[in-house]
Image: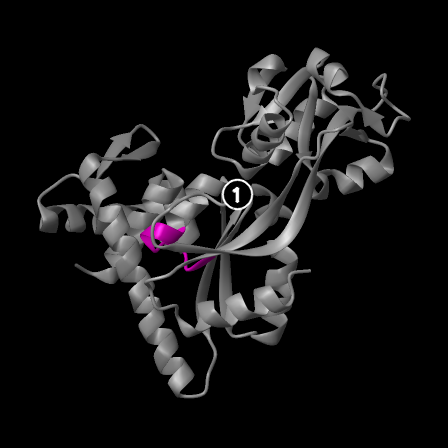
Amino acid sequence: MDLRQLEIFTKVAELGSFSRAAEALHLTQPTVSEHIRTLEDELGVRLLDRLGRGAGVTRAGQLLLSYAARMLALAREARQAVDAFQGRMGGALVVGGSTIPGEYILPAILGRFKEKFPDISTTLLIGDSRGVTDWVAEGRVEVAVVGARLPRRGLEFRELLPDEEVVVAPAGHAWTGRREITLPELAREPLLIREAGSGTRAALEAALERAGVDLGALRVVGEMGSSQAVKQAVKAGMGITIISRRAVEEECRAGWLVCLQVKDLAITRAFHVVTHKDRMRSPVAEAFRIFLEADPG
């Protein structure tokens, strides 16, 4: 199998579109289609379903994806090892981040890392904690930062930074001017939460369990797949939410949102660096891990 074909296949699978993959890879769409067709002919199986303007990964394609990720990672590692041998620190770095660290912590760290190692190109992939943990297990990324420590064989989690979650209400809410509410008050309000698999959701459920309260006792009116979506829904008046303070510091400081704590309910967690115990990290990935843990921001 040709590594370039595998790279194109994984990009189409990731983006769910031949045209978006072509744009990301700076290729024409017919070129992308031809590479996929050649790969399918070689393997004798359909890897992608053509769904109108989109593309869906078949069961055979899902099987190949995990191998493709490992093969591409090994190719990058080989190139970086040769560069390191020659005294150069260059190549490509793919970092994973769950929503909060991916949107609010890692971009600045990657910027500082780029200043120190200008010849390294960086890619940041963002998903929920469960999905990002899967990427590390599959070899798609070598280093990631997540908001929940999930049990997964072969992975190592190291605590990086503490985090606190706060109640967030829209500007003009009856709670404006207050710093604290009670749990019964929280339970009466329509609540927007993150999806299952997110570290934000896991921290909330753990805090409620410690307080002897089930999530079902709250008025959950919606689940959303990103912190940005939750914030926009709160601003639109759909309800309140509980989210990392890091995600709303700017809005609360400006008065666009109201941030509060819940009396006798400490919703805390830690962000963790996750790596694979049994896989040798590339020189670039190891350099980033050391840089990250030395300067988390």
Vertical comparison of 110 with 42: above or below: below
Give the residue drawn at x 39%, y 53%: 136
Q: Quadrant of residue 92?
A: bottom left
- Which stretch is magenta? 136-143
Judged left or right of residue 3, residue 281 is: right
- Crowding around mark 1 (Cα neighbors within 10 Å: few <14, some 14 to 19, many 20+) is many
Is the image coloured rainbow, by chain, by secondary structure, or in one colour? one colour
Judged left or right of residue 186, residue 80 is: left
Mark 1 falls on what kind of element?
loop
Q: Which quadrant does the N terminus fall into? A: bottom left
Q: Nearer the viewer, residue 105 or 161?
A: 161
Judged left or right of residue 168, residue 226 is: left
Where residue 203 appears, as percent x and y from the top left, is 59, 35
Q: Quadrant of residue 52?
A: top left
On whether residue 27 falls in the magenta region, the answer is no
The residue to which callout 1 is attached is 148
Dot 1 amino acid type: Ala
Q: Nearer the viewer, residue 207 or 234?
A: 207
> From this viewpoint, is residue 28 visible?
no
Give the residue drawn at x 54%, y 38%: 199
Judged left or right of residue 44, residue 251 is: right
Where residue 200 appears, as percent x and y from the top left, is 59, 36
On whether residue 139 falls in the magenta region, the answer is yes
Q: Nearer the viewer, residue 146 or 141?
A: 146
Give the residue drawn at x 40%, y 88%: 86
